[in-house]
Image (spheres, rainbow, N blue to C red):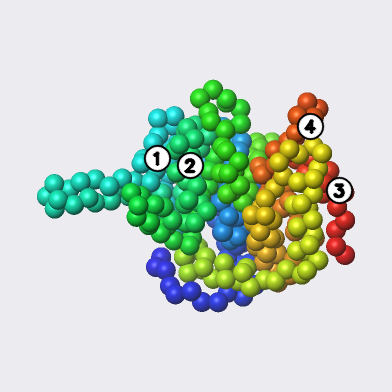
């Protein structure tokens, strides 16, 4: 399916595009509708996504399915302890025939990058993604190479295994829009999965690059009311003064949440945001951006527990 020049999208057209994407992905991902919806928000809000869950919960399949329903290029990196930055970014190799160095591009030169089991690679390799995720470009031997405005990272990690893993540093976690917790599907969904034919479903390409760009433009045009903006800022600032939080969320986190709120509003068919949009997205946008203090950890509190308490204390705009 060839890509065409971007044409403006109406809210109705945008909703139809998103529903077509959902319908195709649901052919292979059962019982994870909420997860698919959050991934849609992440894609159209230009935010990278971190999926955390036990093995066998279709994290990798979800990323692959997203690539299949669009015309965007897809790359996958299996992160391992011996993976080097050059294996991700690429290297300049000397060509003896031309007496010149030539760049051999790594898998990061794509549109959708699946960083599978990202916490298995050492910090040096993890940091190779920092510039790409923040600026959508990479610098190799002093030369900067753009990756394109649609560059999108989906990273997965397994919270169960600790041996041979390296926790992601806060600076890298802050570059993910969402940390989505992937759980097992319910009983009926598992039965449906096992009842399906074992042949791989062929998904239709329903989104072009131009349509994605038009979706981005539509969301950028959605204006947040001052009351919603203040609500977002007050919630983020509350994470910095909460007694159970050692390090709160950054201004980048507030900006990321605002972008996600615009995207969710558009996906719901609205050109305006509601407090419900902020409340729905607050936990997935912040759970990886706060560091709990010793007292909270001793009491067995989780980031979601603390963030829920903050959310309940903060008055929502009417």
Q: Is residue 86 left or right of residue 282?
A: left
Residue at image location 53% in from the left, 34% down from the top:
119
Which callout, 4 or 3, points to the residue nearer the camera?
A: 4
Gap in angstroms between the C-alphas marked 4 and 3: 17 Å
Rate crowding at label 1 as few (under 14), some (14 to 19) or many (20 or more) other CA atoms within 10 Å: some
Q: Position of residue 318 (x, y in %)?
A: 88, 65
Residue 201 percent across, percent down from the top left: 48, 48
Residue tagged 4: 296
Q: Secondary structure at mark 4?
A: helix
Q: Earlier in the sequence, mark 4 or mark 3?
A: 4
Q: Residue furthest top?
A: 163
Q: Is residue 179 above or below residue 217?
A: above
Q: Residue at x 66, y 44 (%)?
A: 289
Query: Tag 1 or tag 3, which sits nearer the N-term?
Result: 1
Is disc 1 in contact with disc 2, using a CB cutoff of under 8 Å? yes
Which residue has dot 2 on it?
127
Q: Earlier in the sequence, mark 4 or mark 2?
A: 2
Q: CA distance from mark 4 to mark 2?
A: 29 Å
Q: Position of residue 221 (x, y in %)?
A: 63, 73
Q: Are marks 4 and 2 in contact (CB under 8 Å)?
A: no
Q: Which residue is mark 1?
A: 85
- First of labels 2, 3 by sequence position: 2
Q: Label 3: state its secondary structure.
A: helix
Q: Are marks 2 and 3 in contact (CB under 8 Å)?
A: no
């Amino acid at each position: 399916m060839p890509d065409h020049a971007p044409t403006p999208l109406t809210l109705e057209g945008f909703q139809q595009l998103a529903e077509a994407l959902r319908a195709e992905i649901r052919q292979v991902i059962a019982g994870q509708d909420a997860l698919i919806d959050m991934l849609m928000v992440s894609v159209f809000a230009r935010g990278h996504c971190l999926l955390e869950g036990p093995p066998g919960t279709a994290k990798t399949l979800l990323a692959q399915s997203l690539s299949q329903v669009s015309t965007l290029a897809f790359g996958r990196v299996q992160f391992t302890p011996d993976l080097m930055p050059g294996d991700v970014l690429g290297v300049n190799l000397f060509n003896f025939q031309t007496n010149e160095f030539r760049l051999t591009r790594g898998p990061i030169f794509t549109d959708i990058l699946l960083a599978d089991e990202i916490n298995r690679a050492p910090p040096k390799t993890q940091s190779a993604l920092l510039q790409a995720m923040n600026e959508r470009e990479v610098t190799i031997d002093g030369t900067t190479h753009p990756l394109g405005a649609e560059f999108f990272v989906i990273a997965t990690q397994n919270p169960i295994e600790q041996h041979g893993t390296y926790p992601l540093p806060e600076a890298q976690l802050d570059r993910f829009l969402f940390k989505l917790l992937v759980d097992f599907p319910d009983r009926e969904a598992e039965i449906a999965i096992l009842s399906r034919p074992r042949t791989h479903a062929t998904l239709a390409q329903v989104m072009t690059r131009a349509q994605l760009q038009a979706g981005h433009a539509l969301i950028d045009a959605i204006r947040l009311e001052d009351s919603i903006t203040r609500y977002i800022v007050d919630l983020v600032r509350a994470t910095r003064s909460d007694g159970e939080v050692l390090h709160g969320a950054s201004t980048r986190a507030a900006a990321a949440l605002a972008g996600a709120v615009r995207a969710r509003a558009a996906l719901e068919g609205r050109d305006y945001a509601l407090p419900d949009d902020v409340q729905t997205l607050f936990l997935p946008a912040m759970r990886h951006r706060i560091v709990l203090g010793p007292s909270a950890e001793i009491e067995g509190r989780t980031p979601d527990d603390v963030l829920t308490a903050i959310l309940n204390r903060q008055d929502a705009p009417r």
